[in-house]
Image (cartoon, rainbow, N blue to C red):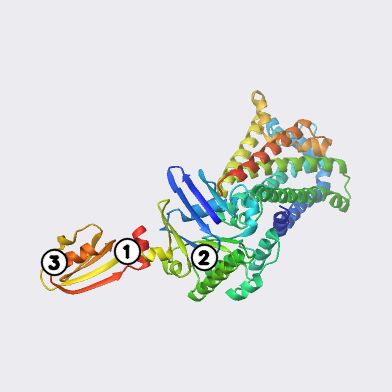
Amino acid sequence: MIRIFLRIIRDKKTSIIVYSVAGILLLWMYVAMFPSIRDQAESLSELMQSYPEGFLEAFGIDEGFNFDRLENFVSIEHFSLIWPIMVIFMLVSFAGAGITGEIEKGTVEIPLSRPVSRIGIFFGRYLAGLFILLIFTIFSVFAVVPLANLHAIDYVFENYTTFAILGFLFGWAIFSLAMMFSAFFSEKSRVYMFIGSLLITMYVLNLIAVLKESFQDLKFLSFFYYYDYKSAVVDNTINSEAIWVFAAVIIFCTFIGAIWYKNRDIAV
Amino acid sequence: MSVIEVQNLKKYFGKIKAVDDISFTVERGEIFGFLGPNGAGKTTAIRCMMDFIRPQYGSIKILDKDAQKDTVELKKNIGYLSGYVSLYDKWTGKTHIDFVCSLNGGEDRSKELIEKFDFDPTRKAKHLSSGNKQKLGLIMAFMLRPEVLILDEPTIGLAPLLQNTVYELLREATNNGSTVFMSSHNLAEVDRICSRVGIIKNGKMVAVESIHALKEMRMYTVTAYFSEDFDKNAFKMDGTEIAKELPKGLVLNVKGDLDPLIKKLGQFNLKDLEIEHASLDDIFLEYY
């Protein structure tokens, strides 16, 4: 398992660097923009009040919310959509290529014909994916510290630590789900289709729940409800419900994925 | 003690009976050829032996261990070559070799094999020809001196000279006590190196014979020329088949006892008669 883990990390080092640098550059862009946004905070607030209420709610902007703090700004601009999209793309493509992609291509026969258990192969890849997520989370979140210092902007370190924990759990849950689907199928395209459809459905359910009070319970079916970036970055809190839900998804999907991979036919 | 023991193996994919109740054994030091037409179930049976796919019924024992339960332990002693060698595009040959070594541990003979096959291990897999991919697959299968070699079409895509290198390696392996189970389409190759063969057709094992016994099967090709008109229907007999009609002659395929045909031929005025033992190819085709 360790050999497989190390081999994958060596193979993926360029991707890890590219993703992390992209995350840092995007964050840098928002941090660099912040001083001019802060100067216009009042007029932006007035402008926002003219937007439809539903539109603002959909983007997590409450009444009285303004861009006078870096945390307010990056939570809306960066951590609301761009950061999770990067995590989703990175982890779903890794999970799809790692398990199903190897079956589709036939390269899975190389480790399978050696004295390594299927569980070892599965968790070698699983741990590599988690490691990649950890590296990405650390660089793309905590880069705010040197960047804010560079631009002489105040920040609250603890809030970013809280978000890093939430973001890591969110990414881990999505990765576990992707690994489970990857263990089910023999074609990468089917994994991407299922995960893509599921996440889009979750996103839409969360939006509907925000916009229509009568459907508000639908939010409980969506990862995007539990991924409460604003509470984490702005208020330094994580809803315990989110931790339990993500933990349950992680345990369930990892267990089912590993067992399925152990028992399935790996026909090439 | 048999090194490979397959009992009543069944593997179905839905309604398709890919392998349907096959049994055979392979003894220590033997090169066992596994033959059959395309889609007969050879690769499916091999994948069951390697525990890539799980049979519905039956048992597979290799080195007295269960191929499914003890698969991890067993694979320390198995060298495997896929029928279609798939490699990691971005890895070089050396990366593949090092990876396999790191998973298995122990000493390897990859350098010697690289020289033998005249293989360049520094090239990335995506730049390798199919023949070079096959070479790398063979190096990975042989390099850890396994007790059992399971090879799916080992010489496919290789030049004749390299095919001879593979035959040498197989003989060397069996001389050192290894056992070889290989599938092949190349009947000349099977005739040359295998001691026994199993023939599979439509998922069923139709024969398990030594090459010697197969060659001893009484199958003949009889070519007869007659000096006068003859009635070809007179040769429609049990075990005799008219393969070809010639001007004033017939080519007959005969299975079993020749005597009734010879007696029948004696009733006609023969101009010429030729009797040949059927080739191994003809015998295999009979099973196919």
Q: Residues within 10 Å of mark 1 (few under 14, many from 20)?
A: some
User: Same chain, marks 2 and 3?
Assistant: yes
Q: Residue at x 25, y 68 (%)?
A: B222
Q: In the image, which disc is placed on residue A78?
A: none
Viewer-closest of B61 and B20: B61
Residue hosting label 2: B154
Question: The disc numbered 3 marks a residue on which chain?
Answer: B
Question: Marks 2 and 3: CB-CB under 8 Å?
Answer: no
Return the disc, 2 or 1, that comes first in the chain's sequence.
Answer: 2
Q: In the image, which disc is placed on residue B267?
A: 3
Q: Secondary structure under badge 1?
A: loop
Q: Residue at x 12, y 73 (%)?
A: B227
Viewer-closest of B272 and B112: B272
Which of discs 2 and 3 lies nearer the camera? The answer is 3
Question: Marks 1 and 3: CB-CB under 8 Å?
Answer: no
Residue B108 point in image, percent of width and height: 67, 67
Which of discs 2 and 1 lies nearer the camera? The answer is 1
Residue hosting label 1: B218
Single out the residue that lies furthest toward the top.
A214
